[in-house]
Image: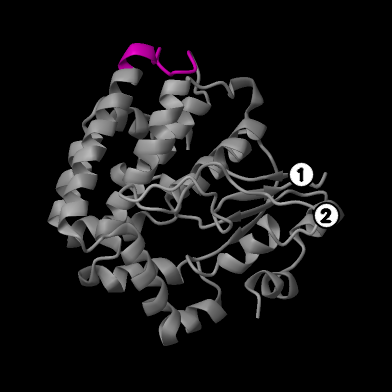
């Protein structure tokens, strides 16, 4: 069976739900840093929205139903790539999150679109910084945390993270077969068992933190937005978070699990503490402490 047809048949029409309820519909993997950027800026705008949380793998049919299941249009993201930094791709991913479906029928296809909608008065961002965030910091920080989350030594923790967001039906499927299938696919995608790729990721992430730190030191007064945070400040804090793991990341929803990760992995703890000490890390922690 065609997977797009399956998505259409099995998923609710989020476009109709948004219109009938006059409430934006927000689709997310809640611990994703891209989704965190969208959710955080929406909360700062006092926007009311209905959230749908999915585990990795569980999100595929809902997102397909919106992105390419709409017979009238496609809604593909221009950022939020799922590929490893080692294997960059210019192809939009039809199952990426976040998504925000507005009552008007407009679909905001990625975190930048959603953040700009939420905080239009501070939507401008330096193109050089945008390039660093989109093509370096965001994919590298995600790949960094997956080095440890997908490590077989931390499989119990990884399972607990999945169960914390998955539906009962998907949790059962995860136990029976989906856990191995999705984890193996993600391990291959992010090359998390490849020691050479991991070392390159960590070194490249250090360089990316250096570039963002230099930008902050040149432009933050005390925020890049001036006296109050702009989208650039929220973006840096969100997209750096997988390598910083602030206590209030995702509203603190997963703090216990991420603290457990650092207890289980001395290497992860050492590197997170290193990144926290950079100017970009300090800025990230300040943003979470004062504004999340």
Residue tagged by mark 2?
21
Q: Residues within 10 Å of mark 2 (few under 14, many from 20)?
A: few
Residue 72 placement: quadrant: bottom right
Reply above or below: 162 against 83: below
The colour style of the image is one colour
Magenta residues (range): 217-226
Please state which of residues 175 and 40 is positioned toward the viewer in this rendering: 175
Q: At 37% across and 45% down in the image, what residue appears?
A: 139
Q: At 52% across and 23% down in the image, what residue appears?
A: 230
Q: Nearer the viewer, mark 1 or mark 2?
A: 1
Reply above or below: 108 against 15: above
Reply above or below: 170 against 140: below
**Helix, strand or loop status at disc 2:** helix
Q: Is residue 212 left or right of residue 72?
A: left
Residue tagged by mark 1?
106
Reply above or below: 125 against 69: above
Q: At 63% across and 45% down in the image, what residue appears?
A: 109
How far apart are the two marked residues, 1 and 2, measured between alpha carbons?
Answer: 15 Å
Please state which of residues 71 and 241 is positioned toward the viewer in this rendering: 71
């Amino acid at each position: 069976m065609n997977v797009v047809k399956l998505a259409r048949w099995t998923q609710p029409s989020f476009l109709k739900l948004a219109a009938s309820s006059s409430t934006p519909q927000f689709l997310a993997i809640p611990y994703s840093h891209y989704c965190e950027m969208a959710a955080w800026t929406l909360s700062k705008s006092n926007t009311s929205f209905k959230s749908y949380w999915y585990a990795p793998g569980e999100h595929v049919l809902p997102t397909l139903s919106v992105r390419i299941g709409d017979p009238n249009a496609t809604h593909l993201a221009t950022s939020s790539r799922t590929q490893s930094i080692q294997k960059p791709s210019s192809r939009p991913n039809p199952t990426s999150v976040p998504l925000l479906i507005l009552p008007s029928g407009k679909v905001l296809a990625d975190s930048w679109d959603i953040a700009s909608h939420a905080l239009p008065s501070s939507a401008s961002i330096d193109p050089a910084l945008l390039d660093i965030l989109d093509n370096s910091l965001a994919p590298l920080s995600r790949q960094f945390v997956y080095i440890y989350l997908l490590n077989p030594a931390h499989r119990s923790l990884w399972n607990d993270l999945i169960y914390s967001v998955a539906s009962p039906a998907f949790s059962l499927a995860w136990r029976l077969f989906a856990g191995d299938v999705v984890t193996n696919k993600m391990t291959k995608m992010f090359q998390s068992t490849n020691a050479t790729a991991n070392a390159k990721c960590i070194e490249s992430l250090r360089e990316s933190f250096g570039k963002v730190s230099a930008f902050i030191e040149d432009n933050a007064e005390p925020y890049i937005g001036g006296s109050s945070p702009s989208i650039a400040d929220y973006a840096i804090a969100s997209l750096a978070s997988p390598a910083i793991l602030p206590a209030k990341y995702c509203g603190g929803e997963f703090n216990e699990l991420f603290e457990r990760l650092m207890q289980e992995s001395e290497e992860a703890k050492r590197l997170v503490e290193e990144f926290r000490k950079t100017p970009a890390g300090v800025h990230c922690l300040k943003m979470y402490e004062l504004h999340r």
